[in-house]
Amino acid sequence: MKRRSLLLATGAASLGSALVVRPAWGQPAKEPRRVGVLQTAPAAVGAKVTRALRDGLRERGHVEGRDIVIDVRYADGRPEEFPRLALELATLKPAVIVASGASATDAALAAAPEAPIVSLHGDFVAAGLAAEIGRPGGRVTGVSMLGTPLDAKRLELLAELLPKGSAVLNLADPRQGTHHVQSVEAAGRPLGLLMHAAYARTPSEIDTAFAIARRLRVAGVNVLASPFLNAHSARIIELAAGAKLPAIYHWRESAEAGGLMTYGPSLPAMFRQLASFVSRILHGAKPGELPIEQATRFELVINLKTAKALGLTIPQSLLVRADEVIQ
């Protein structure tokens, strides 16, 4: 009898232990944390760089559907859509928002007043988004595209194709500010170029800018850094071809689409950089304590098919420096 009582007591104790453990096994998994993404480009174009962000997060151990959900909104080349799209993302309570460009960043800040923002931006300090590069101090950090210095560098590359004293049109988006246009013009004068500027914030104003270019008899067009102008690069490439004007662009994708020449950072590579910021914030880091980084990979791409259509001979000095020559 004593032995039977002992066995029963032991069994009851084991059962009790099982009953204690079982609720722990049955606890629901944590809800995935949301990552919002605001893109200027149409989905067909923006999906490539969003994939780079996804790849970067996966490389850092984040699994979509398990611990993160990525919500993407594309403005389709219309920056005026950002306030509405940012509000849509804000209602989803994202743990962090990735914003591509100045307009997207401003919209995210306004729509989600508590969310950390990881931004792709031209100049964080000049825009008032960061106190300093090494310690931003606010809600925004990310990767600098080096907008103005690269716009000036592209002008130098374009000048190598043009006769001394040629007129060049700097095509700019006024939402990026006018100070950078003045800086680029100042860089062009020592090159012996005659500087003109045209501003476009709508597709129709892009057409008007090329009408101005024809009237001024410019020899080339420098398309300044702008998410809006990049989103409408297909139309710019078409207009440049119709006007028989050599033009230089920011992203390599423009050369792949028929633009003459591009020089700038790799957009997918920068979105992989942004993934590092997102991962650290998801692990508890504050954006104000994460130093802003610069783009690290730059590409010169030349489209020889377009050069032939324009009747241009690309100097060997440019061809040997190109990262890719499209035949």
Image (cartoon, rainbow, N blue to C red):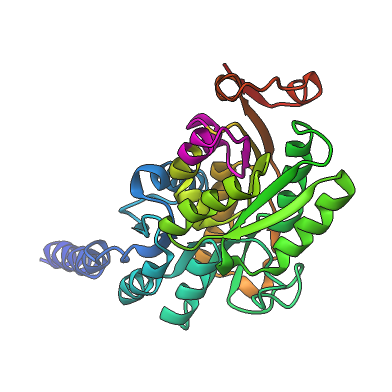
Q: Is residue 95 above or below residue 249?
A: below
Q: Provide the residue span drawn in magenta.
A: 238-258
- Residue 112 in view: no
The residue lying at 50 percent from left, 38 percent from top is 237
Residue 255 highlighted magenta (yes or no) = yes
The residue lying at 67 percent from left, 78 percent from top is 128
Q: In terms of depth relative to the viewer, which is nearer, 261 or 195?
A: 195
Q: Residue furthest top?
A: 327
Residue 72 highlighted magenta (yes or no) = no
Q: In terms of depth relative to the viewer, which is nearer, 179 or 74?
A: 179
Q: In terms of depth relative to the viewer, which is nearer, 76 or 306?
A: 306
322 left or right of 91 in image: right
Q: Is residue 25 above or below residue 250?
A: below
Q: In terms of depth relative to the viewer, which is nearer, 91 or 149?
A: 149
234 left or right of 307 in image: left
78 left or right of 170 in image: left
107 left or right of 251 in image: left
The picture places residue 146, in percent across and down from the top left corner, at 71, 55
Q: Is residue 309 above or below residue 82?
A: above
For the image, the number of numbered tags is 0
The picture places residue 23, in percent across and down from the top left corner, at 22, 68
The quarter of the picture where residue 141 lies is bottom right
The picture places residue 177, in percent across and down from the top left corner, at 63, 69
Q: Residue furthest right?
A: 190
Q: Quadrant of the C terminus?
A: top right
- Residue 218 in view: yes
The residue lying at 17 percent from left, 65 percent from top is 15
Q: Residue furthest front?
A: 215
The picture places residue 59, in percent across and down from the top left corner, at 51, 43
